[in-house]
Every structure is written in C-alpha cells, then in structure tokens.
Image (spheres, grey):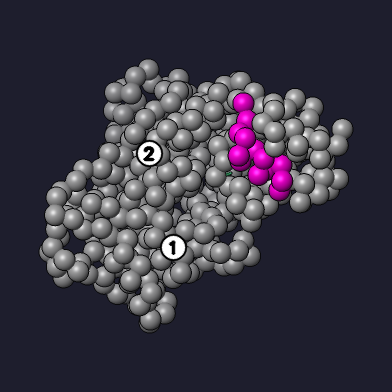
C-alpha cells in the first residue's frame, strides 16, 4: 500500500477500506506517512467527506494508536461528558457533582483549552492547590470513594489524534464532520466510560454554525459510540451567546459554585440540569426526564451536590473553603465597565468575540505552551432578550492590565442591540 494512492482515492471521492484507513493512521503515528501527505489526506476528507463506516474505521484506528483506560476496578456505571467547546462552558463543574451525589461514577479526563478561553483543567486550577495530574490508581480510588474525579488527559490516549489535530489546526481542516467525530470519539472511547454524553454546540462561537451540520455530527458520534457498546446521548445547544454570565477561569468556577448553591444563571442551570438528567437516565437511575430532573433539583436543593463538589476539590488537593469565600481566588487588579451605546434589546452576543476578548485579557491561550491568567475575564450583565438603555452596563472586564481599549471595542461589537425583543432557545435537539 502507498499513502499517495490512498490520498488520490479519497481525492477522487472513492470509499476507503478499513485497511487503507488504518494504513494512513498507523503510518502517520509512526512517522512513515509524512505531515504533507496527512495534510493532503485531511484536505481530501474535508472536501469529499467519509461514509459513517469509514468514519468508524478512522475512529477505531486512532483509538488503537494509544492506551485504553481500564476502569473495570470502578464499581458502578462510569459516565463521562464532553462538550465540543463553547464560551463560558463550565458545565462539567456542575454536572459532575450533581450526578456523583446521586450515585453515578463521574470519571473524566479533560483537556486544556486552546483559544477562546481556558479549558476545564484551567478552570479547576484556578482553585488554590488543585491538582489535575494524579496517578491512575489514585484516580480509580478517588472515583470509588467520592464518585468523582477530573484529571488531565493522559498523553498516551489516541496518539494519532494528538498529532493529527495539531496538523488540522494549521491546515484549515478542523471543521470537517468526519474528522471532528473521529477525533472526539477516539479519545472518549479510550477514556473507558460506559455512558457518554456529548454537548454539541451550534452557533457563532462553535465549530458547527447551523443545526443541520450539528445534527449530522451528533448522529455520527452517537452511532460510533453505540457501535462500540456505549450508551450515548448528544444534545445540541445554542452558542449564539456565551453560556451563563461569566467567561474566564476563576470567574467561571465562582458561577459554577453559585449554580450548585441554586443561584445560577437560568440558561446555564437549565443546561446543567438537562445533561445531568440524561446521564441519570442512561445510567439507568431514572426512567423519565421528569423523574431525573426531580432528582437533580433535589440534589441541588439539599446541598448534596455542593457537598460533593467540596469533597472533590479537597480530594484533588484544592482548598474547599473557596466555596464559602470567593476572595480565596486570585483577584484581578482592575475592573472596567462596558456600556451600551444605544437603547433597545440585546438580540445577540457574539460568543466568539467575547471568547477572543477574554483570551486577549489572558484567560485563554494561543499556543499550548502559553500560561493562562486565572483571575481575568468578563462578566456579562445582560443576556439576549434583555432591554437596555444607552449607558447601561453590558459587561464588566476583569483585567490585570490598565488598558483594555481593544477588549472594550470588541465587546461593544459583540453585543448586537436592536429595536425588537428576541428570545433565544438554548436546547435545540436531543439525539439518543
Ligand atoms: N474537539 C476535538 O477533540 N477534536 C476536534 O476535532 C474538534 C473538537
């Protein structure tokens, strides 16, 4: 077999065999297929697409290039959740404690964020003392003891994806449905959970800009997971405005804690509740969405979910007192208000622009080697549908520099204010 023949075959729109796909993936991982050949291959897939079966073969081939976690020592149903990446997305910090407090084993490997804002690990590291690298045995012991652990992704999961994702990032081949589906699912399957729930974001701040392509991506990932014996749910959620009010690492952790106390923003609370409910259903702890939502509400109302969050923070070396004292988080030196330039109703808050502004403040990274500033970010004061008058505060910038002219301009552009009021639907579709 030769890489060039496989590239030509895909370039011509033909269907590849399992062996041909495995040849490309294994060859690339070992360095026998060159970067320029894999780039051409990724571009051919980008334009020609793949059948569902080809995508499944691609996923399996990538999965086999790394370790597969054995979670069999954890008693009970192991669940994992993944988001395709959104601005202000701190869902794991709330869903994890809720379902763990109800008896589900929440065993999650998480990644660092690139661009926009920090990832879940960066958010967790804003808690003083919190450690994201723990040995495999300790990970398993912690999940058995307190039902929850979130750790950094082992470098050895789906090695091919690691290499391919960096290549796609610089060759304009990230937003291809088969490449995204195989990338996400190879890592999720390697992480060993029985139940996987996926948050597929749709909108300006997401890879998938419309419902049709997001549905296709969701259905494909659900199918791949089911073919591999996992219980799958994908929920399409709107990313036409940031999730909740807070964007930035410690600011988002504070919002997550408020949500666990029952005082979270409505959109974020609704999203966490629906994800928690479907994890409970898939873990066979509830039969209907109504029953599951009641369990979720009770976990928050009773304080059980917040207690689990504290135990989780303590188990991973963090200071659990942050829950009652937000001044224990690193504080930004300056705060600046961004004010409305006209009267009207907020009709859109461009999530990508808010994410980029937060990144510019230092909350996210441009290269994986960059460090993030945990204290900085943006807290919105208005959401889509809110009425505003000229001069009202739209958002507050938390910065460690005293010139935020660019970020202020970006935020003024991100807020679209129109004469008519508009509603935004958050949960767009559920794919089982
Ligand atoms: N997240 C991933 O892990 N892979 C992609 O291709 C896109 C989002």
Q: Nearer the viewer, residue 313 or 223?
A: 223
Mark 2: few, some, or many residues within 10 Å (few <14, many ≥20)? Answer: many
> Tags 1 and 2 in contact by the CB under 8 Å rule?
no
Percent coordinates x, y for residue 324 in the rendering: 34, 58
Residue 420 point in image, percent of width and height? 14, 50
Region rendered in magenta: 39-51
Asked which quadrant contains residue 62, the reply is: top right
Residue most extreme to the bottom: 402
Element assignment for label 2: strand
Ligand 1 contact, mark 1 (Cβ < 8 Å): no
Q: Quadrant of residue 91?
A: top left
- In screen coordinates, is 108 left or right of 334? right
Q: Is residue 141 visible?
A: no
Q: Is residue 164 above or below residue 350?
A: above
Q: Which mark is residue 237?
A: 2
Disc 2 Cβ-to-ligand 1 distance below 8 Å: no
How far across and how far down the image is residue 27, in percent?
Answer: 82, 41
Q: Quadrant of the N terminus?
A: top right
Q: Is 173 located above or below residue 328 in the figure?
A: above
Q: Is residue 49 magenta?
A: yes
Quadrant in the picture for residue 56 = top right
Foreground of the two, 25 or 320: 25
Q: Which residue is mark 1?
A: 356
Identify the residue shown where x is 61% and y is 34%: 49
Q: Is residue 336 in view from this perspective?
A: yes
Residue at the spot 76% in from the left edge and 51% down from the top edge: 36
Helix, strand or loop at label 1? It is helix
- In 3D space, how far apart are the residues under numbered discs 1 and 2 (Cα atoms)? 20 Å
């Amino acid at each position: 077999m030769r890489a060039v023949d496989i590239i030509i075959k895909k370039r011509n729109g033909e269907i590849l065999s399992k062996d041909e796909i495995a040849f490309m993936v294994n060859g690339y991982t070992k360095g026998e297929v060159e970067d320029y050949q894999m780039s051409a291959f990724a571009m051919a897939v980008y334009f020609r697409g793949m059948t569902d079966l080809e995508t499944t073969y691609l996923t399996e081939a990538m999965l086999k290039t790394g370790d597969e976690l054995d979670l069999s020592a954890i008693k009970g149903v192991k669940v994992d959740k993944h988001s395709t990446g959104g601005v202000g997305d701190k869902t794991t910090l709330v869903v994890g404690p809720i379902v763990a407090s109800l008896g589900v084993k929440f065993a999650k490997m998480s990644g660092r964020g690139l661009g926009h804002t920090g990832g879940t690990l960066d958010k967790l590291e804003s808690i003083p003392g919190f450690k994201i690298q723990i040995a495999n045995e300790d990970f398993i012991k912690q999940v058995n003891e307190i039902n929850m652990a979130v750790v950094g992704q082992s470098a050895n999961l789906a090695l091919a994806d690691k290499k391919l994702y960096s290549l796609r990032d610089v060759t304009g081949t990230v937003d291809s449905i088969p490449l995204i589906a195989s990338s996400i699912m190879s890592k999720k399957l390697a992480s060993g959970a029985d139940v996987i729930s996926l948050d597929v974001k749709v909108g300006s701040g997401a890879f998938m800009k419309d419902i049709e392509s997001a549905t296709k991506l969701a259905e494909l990932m659900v199918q791949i997971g089911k073919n591999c014996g996992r219980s799958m749910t994908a929920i399409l959620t709107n990313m036409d405005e940031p999730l909740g009010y807070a964007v930035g690492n410690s600011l988002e952790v504070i919002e997550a804690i408020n949500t666990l106390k029952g005082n979270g923003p409505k959109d974020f609370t609704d999203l966490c509740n629906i994800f928690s409910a479907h994890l409970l259903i898939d873990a066979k702890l509830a039969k209907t969405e109504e029953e599951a939502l009641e369990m979720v509400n009770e976990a928050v109302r009773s304080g059980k979910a917040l207690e689990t969050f504290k135990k989780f923070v303590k188990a991973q070396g963090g200071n659990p007192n942050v829950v009652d004292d937000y001044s224990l988080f690193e504080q930004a030196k300056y705060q600046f208000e961004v004010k409305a330039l006209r009267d009207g109703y907020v009709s859109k808050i461009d999530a990508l622009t808010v994410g980029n502004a937060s990144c510019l403040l230092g909350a996210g990274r441009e290269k994986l080697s960059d460090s993030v500033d945990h204290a900085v970010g943006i807290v919105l004061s208005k959401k889509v549908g809110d009425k505003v008058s000229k001069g009202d505060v739209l958002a507050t910038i938390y910065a460690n520099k005293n010139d935020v002219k660019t970020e202020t301009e970006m935020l003024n552009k991100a807020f679209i204010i129109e004469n008519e009021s508009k509603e935004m639907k958050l949960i767009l579709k559920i794919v089982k």
